[in-house]
Amino acid sequence: MPRLTRIDAPLFDLKKTLESGQAFQWVPQGGGYVGVIGSKPVYVEQEGASLRVTRGCEDLAVHYFALDHPLEEIYATFPDDPAMRESVEWCRGVRILRQPEWECLGTFITSSMKQVKHIQQMSHALRRRFGEPVGEGFHAYPAPERLAAATEEELRACGLGFRARGLGETARAVAEGAVDLKAIHALPDEEALAALCRLPGVGPKIANCVLLFAYERVRAFPIDVWIERVLRHHYFRRKRKITPRRLQEFAAGYFGPYGGYAQQYLFHHARNLPRSVWKTGR
DNA sequence: ACCCAGGACTGAT
DNA sequence: ATCAGTCATGGG
């Protein structure tokens, strides 16, 4: 274990943040977590209102864990309703990470119709198989050039199934320069969403995840099966015919300028409720 | 053995 | 514009 440095991390919940289904690489170890930020192997653990991280990775950690996000101010913008209050109470301290663009895009392309546990497995398989070693047995997320050069069979061997084509083709588009992931930062939300949706294997849900988790578009509101359940259950209990399009419009207007944060809290809270909650009502 | 998962895409109404 | 069918895989 490398030497650790303490950094301030008020109003932060490391465990819930890393287990809330936005990043899929972190492995519990020795009371903390191990993973890779950029190209550095990192160990991080929480101790009260501070973090202890691998020496030399302090700045990386502050940026990656978004310790500068004003959480209390963000909570104050949330709508005041029972579902939102319960989610904030349970998820207090969860932060929306700043992940590298390609790493986030790639992993979410593989997320389609997969449970969080499976996404973690595929992500680790891809790193081990194609990622650059960064020391201590860790691997960076494989560069687009590397995945572009892989055959679809090799990608499928990592458990990707039908997602292999999307990941390979999108890797190719990025590697060839047909898409500039950095340039998307300069686009307004709608155009950035459209740009991502043009990539193979990327639709509205995955594009919104990437906008939220890599482009700091804290208003982006990805709607997956869980969030759809939450929205229908809490906000459209009696209405039967609500189209996905209508749900998306409601979310954009109702949850405000930090809708993405609200979404993440609703998502993580709902996923940790007992199954029996969802059996009745619906 | 079944069920479902942080969906996208295609082709038919 | 909606809608069903299809696409693979593995953990509960």
Image (spheres, coloured by chain):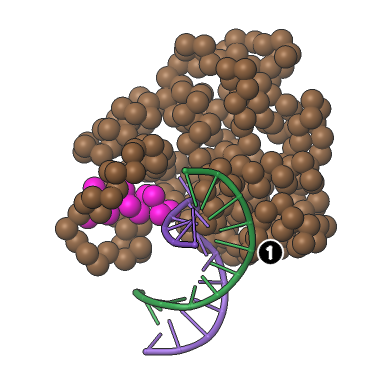
Chain colours: A brown, B purple, C green
Residue A250 in sight in this render: yes
Q: Quadrant of the N terminus of chain A?
A: top right
Does the magenta segment cover residue A232?
yes
Instruction: Please name the residue shown 52% across and 11% down the image.
Output: A47
| Element at label 1 | helix
Residue density around tag 1, few if under 14, some if 14–19, many if 20 or more, within 10 Å: many
Q: Which residue is mark 1?
A: A165
Camera-side residue of A67 and A116 = A116
Q: Position of residue A203 (x, y in %)?
A: 52, 61
Chain of residue at mark 1: A
The image shows residue A146, relative to residue A27, as above or below, that is below
The image shows residue A221, relative to residue A84, as above or below, that is below
Which is the main secondary structure of the residues drawn in magenta?
helix
Residue A166 in sight in this render: no
Identify the amino acid type marked 1. Answer: Arg
Q: Which residues are magenta?
A: A223-236
In the rendered structure, the answer to whether residue B1 lies left or right of residue A154 reads: left
Camera-side residue of A161 and B6 = A161
Instruction: Please name the residue shown 35% across and 64% down the image.
Output: A245
Q: Position of residue A94 (x, y in %)?
A: 44, 29
In the rendered structure, the answer to whether residue C12 lies left or right of residue A3 reads: left
